[in-house]
Amino acid sequence: RFCKVDVLLPGIMNLPYLNEGEINELEGLPVVPVLVLLLQKLQGWDDHLKCVEFHKHRKHTVDVEDIKDLLGRVGEMPVRLFRPWSERGLLGEQFVTASKARVKAFCARFPETTHLWAGLGFEVA
């Protein structure tokens, strides 16, 4: 499987501003907190799913695989890399509210992921 790296700036696509203590390091590389990444992927899925431009709309299938993969890996991550919902304070209230709705929509389409989202503390129905 190929990996694409995006370098994004805070404020774009609802990305939060992170201070040094909020950024994790993995093998010497700075990485965004897992919850932030997961919810950004979920936002991308929702945006792509609703997009009328075919080349953007078709990306939602890749987003689904990425989200499922991330959800499956969260349980394997050390607590220092993933703290369920502890990063919520980094995210704006509007983004958190939208994310909750997106989680429910994702679970409705992919019920096999419901237990994983619920395990992270999300309402799924």
Image (cartoon, grey):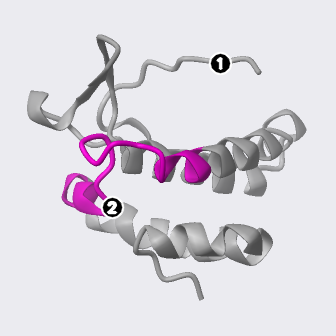
Residue furthest toward the top? 28
**In the shown orientation, is residue 83 left or right of residue 8?**
left
Q: Contact (CB < 8 A) between labels 1 and 2?
A: no
Residue 33: horizontal and vertical position, in percent? 32, 40
* Residue 122 image-quadrant placement: bottom left
For the point 29% across and 33% down, the residue is 10
For the point 60% across and 51% down, the residue is 72
**In the shown orientation, is residue 66 left or right of residue 89?**
right
Residues in magenta, as a range: 70-90
Residue 13: horizontal and vertical position, in percent? 44, 41
Tell me if residue 111 comes above or below residue 34 in the rendering: below
Q: Earlier in the sequence, mark 1 or mark 2?
A: 1
Tell me if residue 98 comes above or below residue 39 in the rendering: below
* Residue 31 image-quadrant placement: top left
Residue 58: horizontal and vertical position, in percent? 86, 41
**Residue 16 belongs to the span the image colors magenta:** no
Number of marks in the rendered image: 2
Q: Nearer the viewer, mark 1 or mark 2?
A: 2
**Residue 73 belongs to the span the image colors magenta:** yes
**Residue 102 shows up from this direction:** no
For the point 48% across and 83% down, the residue is 123
